[in-house]
Each structure stands twice: as structure tokens, then as C-alpha cells.
Amino acid sequence: MLRSRYLLIAGLIPALFAQAGLAAEDWSLCRIPSFNFTEADNIASDETSVEAQTIVSEDNETVHLVGDASVIRAQQQISADDILFNKSTEEIKASGNVEFADPSSRLQSPRVEIDNRNASATFEQPVFMLHSRHISGQADKIEKLDEYRSRFSDLSYTSCDPDDRDWHLRAAELEIDDESGRGSAKHTTIYFKEFPFLYLPYFQFPVDDRRLSGLLTPTYGYEESNGTTVILPVYWNIAPNYDMTITPASFGKRGFQLNTENRYLFETHQGELDLSYLDDDDEVDDSRWFQRWRHRTSLAYDINGDLLLAEVSDRDFFDDFGSVAPEYNDINHLERHLSFARSGEVWRGLLLWQDYQTLDRDTAIDSRPYSRLPSLSLDAQPEPWIENLQTPVNLEITSFDRDDSVTGTRTHIVSSLNWNASDSWYFFEPELQLAFTDYQLDENPGDDSISRGLPTLSIDTGLIFERLAGSRNQWLQTLEPRLYFLHTPFEDQDDIPDFDTALSASTYNNLFKNNRFTGADRIGDANQVTFGLASRIFDNDSGVELLNARIGQVFHFKDRRVSLDGSRDEETRSDAIAELDVWPNSRTKIEARTVYNQEQSELSGKEFSISYSDNGLAMNLGYYFDKDVLVDEDELEQALVSMAYPINERWTFVGKIHHSLLFDQTVENLLGLNYESCCWGLKILARQTGDEDEDFAETDSGVYFEITFKGLSQVGQDIDTQLRDSIPGYRSDF
């Protein structure tokens, strides 16, 4: 045994491709590598074993191994016909059938020279393989220039099986610099099925997680409204705390669009500036644009600031260019705001300026949201006076503004006195609340100054019964009756404008709210009691919830005279609301909700959905009906079915049918196939969407594709984002 500090070839090839293979890549479809590394377990970590037919050392400095020569460490092995190493200069020269191996890689070369002292090496005509990343390749020469830099001449590599290279990359020269975190390549061509489809004369790329300017993955697709789409994003790393993504896009029917995303970061400030511009060829003299600035800051005295400025040229911009700002694709009003917030131990304060751009200019004035210029709110939750006796206080002062409307300032103060008592089998929560509201109005047909003060008494109480159920007592079932009493006296509020108020949605939880309205402009008169009954079933061993069923209804002792339109509600009972959540197993969820109007003996709302997800298979079925959600003065009624079905280990079918039963029109249809091989994958998706503003009678169709080269990159539309949004439970394997 020789004790040695020889580097051998350790880490050279793995270091080169450290960033080439993605951590989530799946190589299960590839053949098992023919090479298996066997560790030398009888050699200590600081020892080196040498073997050869002839071992010669003439000066005690140079050791010459001839014939079946090998140098072995516990984690490294090198063999050749001839190996010569110098202990003083730490140089190794090997020739003739040179092979190096460690647990993750193997390299073969006719001649190798290694200078461990200067961390340099030269490999003539090497053939290499990285088993953990399933990468193999060859080069005319590999030169390790120093500790950080390496150069590859006439390089070819792939992540496919060596004898079945569906794709491979060739580069005339490639350099890696681990110190700067950069690599560069000259005259690079990517081949697919031996067809060269991408050539780059020169490009740079990162070899670690440091940012680097360069070309990002391009996007291709076709849409009926836009034509052929080509998007080519470029990343610019301006400074450690500045960067920009410049994204030119070409639309066959609309022209050239330029998008930029600008980011900055300081110690107490950060933000993004997004800009988009297009002269639309499909519209005469139509300049279409979008701009948004988002800034967040931490100021003195623990104050956090948040700024959002956004504006768009027209109502259809987000529909036509959905990739520019996907979060805005389904909005009608574009928000802008400036806020300052600070929190203490028992309080939180917020100062807010907020307004909106209504995208549809034909929207009636009274259907547009008010601006808050500004709004000041303060929420305080002092420590309990006596045990569970609490006294929360909420204050809000808001100045509302809107063109051609009643405007003014609203001051709303709510103070409460509540007591919470509970145990494992019951809860009892009485509350006395006093709400005072003052309005100072402009352009109001009535009084310019209006005040309102109303008390509200509520008592929320319930019991929790438990029993073991099932043939083996494997379940724990609860029965939870709940009683909620609410009393608020009537006060005429018809002269008060509606700044931000609406009726609450018909859900089980909203039956137990102390005001049937959202916002502060209406406080509903109430003399009522709500009965609710819930039952839950849990797995007795794991505690996992298997079923949650609940039903409730409000019984009124008086007519409700407070409303948004001046009408009077004389019904003695509210809609009966029943909701059900069932988890038959960890893969399946069933949800149902019904809203039954007993006065008219009809269902005013119905929802039902089933979701199943298991090992790549996802199936969803849904039906939705709601008389209170109107589309062109008609109730909403839609049904959908969606699926991601793995046909086998290589092919996956994806599809969705989302249909408006009211208009007998398409809301969204999807049809696609995913194919995955050992080293590449292909996704093809056809999509058709209906325009809700046109009762879904107008549709837009598109075809998208995405090809992924494992261990390299992907080219095409980001189909996975669309599928995750459209098919709950969808999971991409590549």
C-alpha cells in the first residue's frame, strides 16, 4: 500500500455536468447501465493500492507500472497498459486503454496526463459516462487547466442510452469556469433524431446557481386569434441587485410585441416593473400595452409599505396575451394601491389608497368599484379583562370617490364585548356589539351628513357528542348541534349610499354571521335564530377526517326591512343550506352543496364535484348551478369533466370538457397527449376557450407543443401551467 495525496481524475466529469441534469429527472425508462462500480473495501481512505505485471522504481521518486496496471483507492480506480507517476512532482501519466471509474462516473481514454500539484490534466479522445445523471459523451480532448477551469474540444454528449441517442449536443469548444460560475460554448448544434434543429455560434450558461445573462427557453405555439406565436426571452443580469428579462414576441396576426420584467433589491426595498407594448396589426391604429410597478419596503418604526400601480390599454389585452400577466386573465377591474401597515402586540393599523381601472369601458357607473382615497383602519384586541372576557375594537375611516356618483367619507367604529367559554363537549359565546357609522357626503340627493348607531346581540352555542362507530369501532363520529341567536333593531338606511356592500354568499358558515351584508353600508335588522347540525367522521387510528356533513337554516321572527334596493323580505325562513365533504380514501374527495328555497319549493343552488388523484391518474367531475350568479340576467349552470390518464409508462392522455348548459356553448375544452422516453418528452395540447362576455358564443382555439430534452432544457409552450390550472390533481413527470 502507498499513502498518497494523488488527485487522480476525481470530480472532473461530474463537476462539468453538475447543473446539466435536473434533480427531478426520471431515468426509469432507460436501460440499466452495463457498468457497476465495486468499491475496494479493504483500502483505507488515505491509502492507494497499485498493481501491475511489472512495477519499477529506479530513483524512489518515480514509480512505473507496466502491463495490466491499476491504481486503486476506496472510491477511485484507474487502470491502463502503462502508468507512470512521480511522487515529488505529483504527476501521473497513463497510456493504453486508460479507464477511470468512481461510484458516479467512468472515463476511457488512450492517453491521460495529470498534474496534481497544479490541479491540471489532459485527456486524449475521452469517452465518458455519468451514471447518476445518465449522461454520456465523448470529446477530442479534455483539458483541466487549473483548479477551476476546464476546456472541452469537439464535444458530443447526450442523456440518452449510449446506443440509442435520440438527441445529442455537439460543440466545437466548451469551457467551464467554476470560480465565476460560467460556461461558454462555440459552434453548438443540437440534434434530434440526427436532424440538426438548433445552431448557436456562441452562448454562455451558468454552471451553478449564480445568475447569468443569456437566452432563456423559447416558446412556440398557434392560436386562432393570434396566429403563429414565437416568444424568445433573454435574461440580463445587470448587477447583483438588478436584473431584467427582455421578451420579444412575434404574433403572426398581430405583429411584434416587446415585454420587459425589471427587478431590483435593496436592504429595505424591493420591487418589479413590468412593461408590454404592441402595435396590433389586427386593429387599425391600435397601440396595446400593459404596465405595472410593484414596490415593497420596510420603513422606520416597523412600518411596511406596499405600492401597486397597474394600467392596461384595453379590456381584451389579458385575453389575447395571457402569458404577459396570467394572474389578471379573469378580472374585470385592475387594482392599484398604496398602503402602509404596522402591527403591535394587540393592534394592527393600515393606511390605504386604492382605486381600480375598469377594463370594460361600457360598464355602468354604478357597477364600478369606488376608490378609497384614502382609508385608515385600526384593529385592536386588548388582553381579556376577566378570564375570557374580550373587548375588541375596530375603526375604519374611508374617503370614497367615483366619477358621476355620490362620494364622501365614512367613519365606522365597532366595539364589542364578548365572552368565550368552551370545552371538549360544548362552546358558549355571547357577544354584544355596538356599531356607529358617520357619513359626510357630496353629491347626495338627500342629506349630506348621516349618522347611524346600532347595537347587535348574538349568542352562539353548541354541543359536541362523540361515539365510536363501525363494525370494529374503527371510526369516531360526532354529532354537533348548533344554535345561533341574533338580534339587531331596525334603522332606516335607504338614504345611505352603497360604497362597498353586497349580500353574503349562501354558505353554511355565513348562516352564523352577525350581518347578512358584507361591507359597512348596511347593517341588517335581525330577530332570528339559526339552527345548524353537523356530523363528522374520523378514522379512529390516524385521526384523519373522512366525512363532514352540515345543514342549517335561519328562522326569522320579523320581516327584514333593510336591503340594498329598498325591498322588504317577508319570508319567515331562509334558504336551507346543506354541505357535504367526503374523503372515501386518501385519493378521492366528494363535495356537494345544495341551497333549497322552501317558500318557492325549489333548489336555487346546486354544486357537486368528485376528484380522484393517484399515481399520475387524475379525474374530476363537476356540476354547478346558482340562480344568484347571473350571466346576462340568467342563472349560472355549467358542467365539466377532466382527466389525466396514464395509458402506460410512456403515454398520458389529458382532456377536459367544460360546458355552459345555459347557453349550450363551450367554456373550455382541452385535448392532449404526453409522451416520455428515456431522455426526452413531448407534450401536445389543443385548447378551445369561450368568451364569457359573449355568452361563450365566440371561441378562441390554439395548439401548443413542448419538447423536453432531459438533462438539457425544454422548448415550447409551458403546457404544464395550463394543465395544472385546468385539471386539479394533474402531475407532470417531466
Image (tube, rainbow, N blue to C red):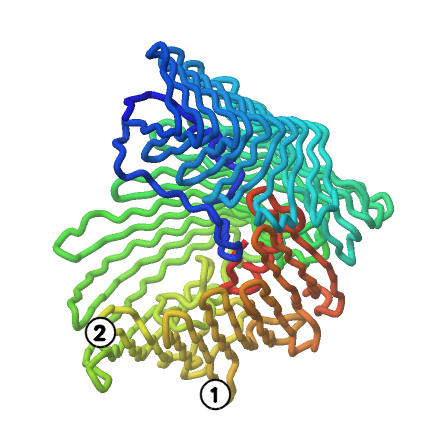
Question: How many residues crowd around disc 1 within 10 Å: few (fewer than 14), some, or many (20 or more)?
Answer: few
Q: Nearer the viewer, residue 628 or 380?
A: 628
Name above or below for residue 675 compared with residue 461: above
At x 57%, y 28%, the residue is 212
At x 41%, y 70%, the residue is 587
Question: How many residues crowd around disc 2 within 10 Å: few (fewer than 14), some, or many (20 or more)?
Answer: some
**Precedes in sequence: disc 1 or disc 2:** 2
Q: Nearer the viewer, residue 190 or 86?
A: 86
At x 33%, y 12%, the residue is 60
- Distance from disc 1 to disc 2, alpha carbons, whole Å, reads 41 Å
| Residue underneath mark 1 | 599
Q: Judge from the rendering whether residue 9 lies leftward or rightward of residue 483; answer left or right.
A: right
Q: Nearer the viewer, residue 581 or 400?
A: 581
Residue located farthest toward the bottom when viewing the structure as drawn: 601
| Residue 311, quarter of the rendered image | top right
| Residue underneath mark 2 | 540
Mark seen at residue 725: none
Amino acid marked by disc 1: Glu
Label 2: element kind: loop
Amino acid marked by disc 2: Asn
Inspect this view and state whether residue 415 appears.
Answer: yes
At x 21%, y 55%, the residue is 390
Residue located farthest toward the front when viewing the structure as drawn: 54
Label 1: element kind: loop
The reply to whether dot 1 and dot 2 touch (C-beta < 8 Å) is no
Q: Position of residue 618 (x, y in %)?
A: 51, 68
| Residue 362, quarter of the rendered image | bottom right
- Which quadrant does the N terminus fall into? top left
Q: Position of residue 256 (x, y in %)?
A: 79, 41
